Amino acid sequence: MLIELSYVISEHVPKWPTNPEEKYDYNQAFRFGDTCNASSVYHHLHTGTHVDAPFHFDKTGRTIDEIPAEDFYYTAPLVLKLMKSEGERVELAELKVHEEEIAKCDILFLYTGYSDLRESSPEKFVSDFPSMAPDAARYLRKNFPGLKAVALDSISFDSAVTGAAEGFPSHHALLETNEEQTERTLLLYEDVNIKKLAEQDTVRAVCAFPVRFAGLEAGPVNMVAIV
């Protein structure tokens, strides 16, 4: 069975507070008397279910079109249920408890439960959502060579309240390569419908192939779990 983990994109999708609005342009439409429907979409790459490539926070990092397809296919997924409230973070101590499990996975899904607000209270969902502590991000990057990606059910690994002022430390910890961070970078999936996955007893594989935009730092994905 296949389970879709990506949200449908619309003009009213919840988004990072400063992202521009999504917009559809109906270039041709039956209702206008045209012979077909043909549309253009204005879409921000960090709105909706998407994947961040290293180039998002690393000037010399790989762009979304440079990453091999194998990096978007996972055969050892792990879901951790770490329930969070407004403004809380995924902490290092919580991950260390699951160190043996994480060492065996190639993609780590962090389910905070905050995504329940996505439809019922979208303004709250995007205002002070759960994020990841920088030391927790560094821990994942440095200690698990088999880990290829991390997914979160909120819209960002850094807080909408403090992230910009702090310089988006968790993104840098996971995506940037420098003298202090030489380990393999991780792919980051944000705004993922992990609740569907958390309800499953067994997950055989997950694929999350992005739309490839040449030279850019991210891409929308249709993430699908095979159960």
Image (tube, grey):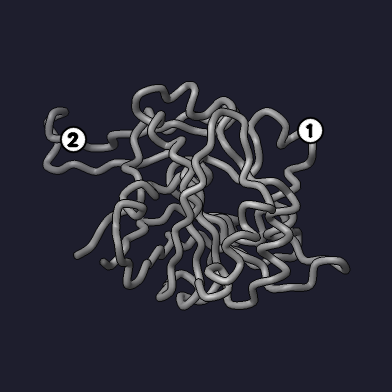
Is residue 81 at least partly visible in the picture? yes
**Residue 52 x %, y %:** 57, 55
Q: Nearer the viewer, residue 92 or 172?
A: 92
Q: How many angstroms separate mark 2 from mark 1 (CA)? A: 45 Å
Q: From the image, which quarter does the N terminus lie in?
A: bottom left
**Residue 16 x %, y %:** 55, 33
Residue at image position (62%, 30%) is 87
**Residue 84 x %, y %:** 53, 37
**Is 140 on the left or on the right of 19, as rendered?**
right
Type of amino acid under label 1: Ala
Residue at image position (46%, 45%) is 153
Type of amino acid under label 2: Ala
Q: Which residue is situated farthest in the front direction here?
A: 97
Number of numbered discs present?
2
Q: From the image, which quarter does the C terminus lie in?
A: bottom left
Q: Nearer the viewer, residue 26 or 18?
A: 18
Q: Quadrant of residue 86?
A: top right
- The reply to whether dot 2 and dot 1 touch (C-beta < 8 Å) is no
**Is 189 on the left or on the right of 140, as rendered?**
left
- Report crowding for label 1: few under 14, some 14 to 19, many 20 or more residues within 10 A (C-alpha): few
Residue at image position (44%, 52%) is 220
Residue 29: give its label. Answer: 2
Is residue 66 at least partly visible in the picture? no
> Does residue 76 sit above or below 31 in this rendering?
below
Residue at image position (70%, 71%) is 143
Q: Quadrant of residue 89?
A: top right
The residue labelled by disc 1 is 165
In the structure shown, which secondary structural element does the residue marked by tag 2 occupy? loop
> Does residue 190 sit above or below 25 in this rendering?
below
In the structure shown, which secondary structural element does the residue marked by tag 1 occupy? helix
Q: Nearer the viewer, residue 107 or 32?
A: 107
